[in-house]
Image (cartoon, grey):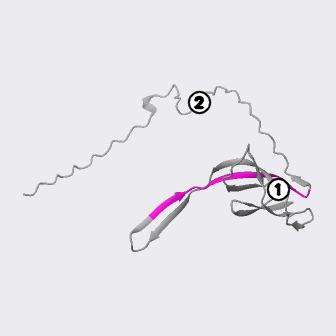
Amino acid sequence: MYAVIRAGGKQYRVAPGDVIRLEKQADEDGKIEFGDVLAVSGGQGQISVPATGARVMGEVVEQGRGKKILVFHYKRKKQYKKLRGHRQDFSAIRITEIAFDGQKFSAPALPKKTAKAKKEAEPKAKTGPRLKAAGKSAAQKPAKKAAAKKPVAKKATKKK
């Protein structure tokens, strides 16, 4: 079962449970109803064009901004360049129900998110490179090599 809907000037093929990204949609309590249904497929592969009464319901899963798109204007030989960026707002919508001709096709319910119990912080044993062994002395460390002296460069004299 799927339907073809029109939203934001584009057409989308959706089925119950699908998540689609549209231009930002105004929603009421996270629910959206698409009334502009162009076609609906039945169970046996029959496609029908609903006159009225077909509707597609969805819920808003996420709202955000997409990737940045760079818009670069350039005119050769005229020293003209302009660079602008744009990020399109979007709404991710999960299709929950398709209804027409008295039939309803619903998506399975998503499992509820549960709060995870915080693990008790256990004190960690102090180990690592910062702790020095008690028996080491300065004599056991390798000696640093003496840096070779570089010849001093001559200073430039002023011209008269």
Q: Position of residue 137 (x, y in %)?
A: 45, 28
- State whether residue 81 is above or below residue 77: above
Q: Which residue is located at x 51 percent, y 26 percent?
A: 135
Label 1–label 2 contact, CB within 8 A:
no
Q: Position of residue 23 (x, y in %)?
A: 66, 56
Of 159 and 115, nearer the camera is 115
> Residue 102's image quarter?
bottom right
Of 82 and 126, nearer the camera is 82
Q: Is residue 131 left or right of residue 107?
A: left
> Residue 38's image quarter?
bottom right
User: SS class of the residue under badge 1?
Assistant: strand
Q: Position of residue 117 (x, y in %)?
A: 74, 30
Q: CA distance from mark 1 to mark 2?
A: 64 Å
Of 27 and 87, nearer the camera is 27
Q: Position of residue 29 (x, y in %)?
A: 74, 43
Task: Tell me the tag on residue 55.
Answer: 1
User: SS class of the residue under badge 2?
Assistant: loop
Could you tell me the amino acid type at mark 1? Arg
Instruction: Identify the residue under disc 2.
Output: 127
Which quadrant is home to the C terminus?
bottom left
Q: Which residue is the extreme one toward the front?
A: 52
Q: Which residue is located at x 60 percent, y 56 percent?
A: 88
Q: Which residues are magenta?
A: 82-101
Task: Tell me the tag on residue 7.
Answer: none
Could you tell me the amino acid type at mark 2? Thr
Main SS, magenta region, reads strand
* Residue 144: in magenta span: no
Q: Is residue 158 left or right of residue 134?
A: left
Which quadrant is home to the N terminus?
bottom right
- State whether residue 134 is above or below residue 23: above
